[in-house]
Image (cartoon, rainbow, N blue to C red):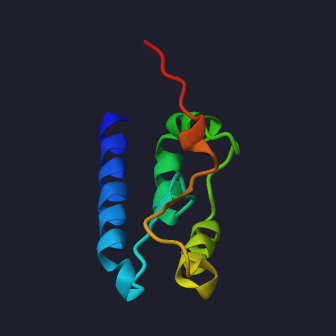
Amino acid sequence: MCAYAASKCGVHGLTRVAAIENSARNIRANTLAPGWTETPMVVANSAQNPGFAQHATSAIPAKRGGQPGEVAAAAVWLCSSAASYVFGQMIVVDGGMTVGGFEFKD
């Protein structure tokens, strides 16, 4: 999880700087950060390792993976005029995983 967390922070930092540098020209920079999403690749990998898939989805407060359409809806919103005053934000679409997910055990 360390590398995952570091990469998300790096992307968020880059997004914020891009927003600062471009907002005066009304160019919005935002990031969409999806969590476990039931894409064909995730479904295939879950079938190969059902134990990991069960562990991963049970760690999500919503107790399920996201649907591609749910992530797409957030992307469409970010691109719409409804989000015209949203600059430099990371929109996390992960069923609450990053606010209370994995239980760490030694």
Residue 78, position as x, y percentages in the image: 55, 76
Asked if residue 104 is positioned above or below residue 52 in the image, the reply reads above
Residue 62, position as x, y percentages in the image: 70, 45
Quadrant of the rendered image containing residue 96: top right
Q: Nearer the viewer, residue 64 or 19?
A: 19
* Residue at 48%, 16% in the rendered image: 105
Q: Is residue 29 left or right of residue 34?
A: left
Residue 44, position as x, y percentages in the image: 49, 56
All told, the count of numbered labels is: 0
* Residue at 50%, 36% in the rendered image: 52
State which quarter of the image contains the C terminus: top left
State which quarter of the image contains the N terminus: top left
Q: Is residue 6 left or right of residue 81?
A: left
Residue at the extreme right: 62
Residue 5, position as x, y percentages in the image: 37, 42
* Residue at 29%, 74% in the rendered image: 21
* Residue at 53%, 82% in the rendered image: 79
Asked if residue 97 is positioned above or below residue 41 in the image, the reply reads above
Asked if residue 83 is positioned above or below residue 106 in the image, the reply reads below
